[in-house]
Amino acid sequence: MKIMAVDYGDARTGLAACDRTEFLASPLGVIHEYDFDRTVEQVAYAAEEYQVGKIVVGHPVNMDGSAGERAQKCALFAQKLQEKVSVPVILWDERGTTVTAHQYLNETNVRGKKRKDVVDEVAASIILESYLAYRQNHPEEK
């Protein structure tokens, strides 16, 4: 099944998707939008366009497992997105994905404006890779 991951942000929202074999997570791009409702609409449109069967929204819970303001906003985003699409929308623990994305970009020497443009879609790819690894190790939950 094609699955899309979303790294929601107030100004930039990264998207990534996998192929039907759930083998490869690839960045789809970044939505540059400040308006919450328009971002929901654009992600719903992307999900329809890419014909995904599930959407995974990054959920940035705190290291102690509690949900801070950012995690609550992402949960609301997932809820509003679920109202717009006919496929399941789930929250996925994304602790540390942005840090990992920055480390990856450091290793590949991506700097400046280019870095700012791609960090969110790289983070979405990392979220999706984490979710795909979980699905592979828990086939009973597919």
Image: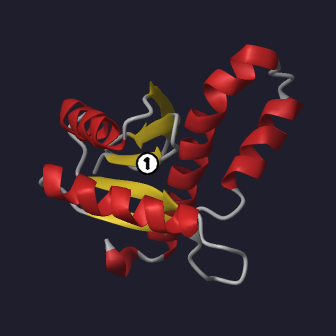
Q: Nearer the viewer, residue 37 or 140?
A: 37
Q: Is residue 14 visible?
A: yes
Note whether 97 is above or below 50 in the view shown: below
Q: Is residue 20 left or right of residue 48?
A: right
Q: Total of numbered circles in the picture?
A: 1
Quarter of the image for residue 135 reads bottom left
For badge 1, the amino acid type reads Ala
Query: What residue is rendered at 30% in x and 46% in y?
Result: 2
Where the C terminus falls, by quadrant? Answer: bottom left
Q: Position of residue 29 (x, y in %)?
A: 48, 26
Image: 115 above or below 13: above
Q: Nearer the viewer, residue 52 or 36?
A: 36
Q: Give how far across and how far down residue 80 sits, in percent.
A: 25, 56
| Residue highlighted by disc 1 | 5
Q: Secondary structure at mark 1?
A: strand
Is 33 or 140 nearer to us in this picture? 33
